[in-house]
Image (spheres, helix red, strand yellow):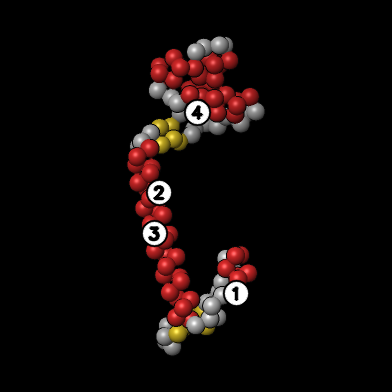
């Protein structure tokens, strides 16, 4: 995935231009930086939190595909865990489900699971 990195000096240059009253649309086009990112940098600079580099995703479609793959993997993992709980024959209590604190001991030599 392509990512752009910006130096602190570059960010400071844009922030200073904004503070001097430059047109944000023109700055955005000139430097090919989203206006929302420039405004975020301005806020960070005013709060003394401007960092040296920030990575952004230059291709939103690629990021969406990456997130969709991640969701698919998490759904598959979730289904696997549900099946493991059924095989263990020890359904978790409701408070365990809500808190995410479900413990299962698996003994591969026995071929079963214990809660």
Q: Which residue is mark 2?
A: 67
Q: Residues within 10 Å of mark 1 (few under 14, many from 20)?
A: few
Image quarter hosting the N terminus: top left
| Element assignment for label 1 | loop
Q: Which residue is mark 1?
A: 93
Whole-angstrom CA distance, mark 4 to mark 2, is 21 Å
Q: Name which of mark 3 and mark 4 comes first in the sequence.
A: 4
Q: Nearer the viewer, residue 7 or 41?
A: 41
Relative to 13, is 48 above or below? below
Q: Are marks 2 and 3 in contact (CB under 8 Å)?
A: no
Q: Pinpoint residue 15: horizontal percent, then vertical percent.
A: 54, 20
Q: Pinpoint residue 67: horizontal percent, then vertical percent.
A: 40, 48
Residue at image x 45%, y 70%? 81
Q: Which residue is mark 4?
A: 37
Q: Name which of mark 4 and mark 2 comes first in the sequence.
A: 4
Whole-angstrom CA distance, mark 3 to mark 1, is 25 Å
Q: Name which of mark 3 and mark 1 comes first in the sequence.
A: 3
Image quarter hosting the C terminus: bottom right
Displayed quadrant of residue 4: top left
Residue at image x 42%, y 85%? 111
Whole-angstrom CA distance, mark 2 to mark 1, is 31 Å
Mark 3 or 1, closer to the camera: 1
Q: Are marks 3 and 4 in contact (CB under 8 Å)?
A: no
């Amino acid at each position: 995935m392509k990512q752009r990195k910006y130096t602190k000096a570059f960010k400071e240059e844009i922030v200073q231009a904004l503070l001097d009253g430059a047109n944000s649309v023109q700055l955005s086009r000139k430097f090919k930086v989203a206006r929302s990112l420039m405004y975020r940098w301005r806020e960070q600079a005013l709060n003394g939190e401007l960092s040296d580099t920030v990575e952004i995703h230059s291709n939103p479609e690629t990021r969406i595909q990456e997130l969709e793959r991640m969701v698919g993997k998490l759904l598959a993992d979730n289904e696997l865990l549900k099946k493991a709980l059924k095989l263990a024959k020890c359904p978790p209590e409701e408070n365990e489900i809500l808190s995410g604190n479900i413990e299962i001991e698996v003994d591969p030599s026995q071929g079963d699971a214990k809660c």
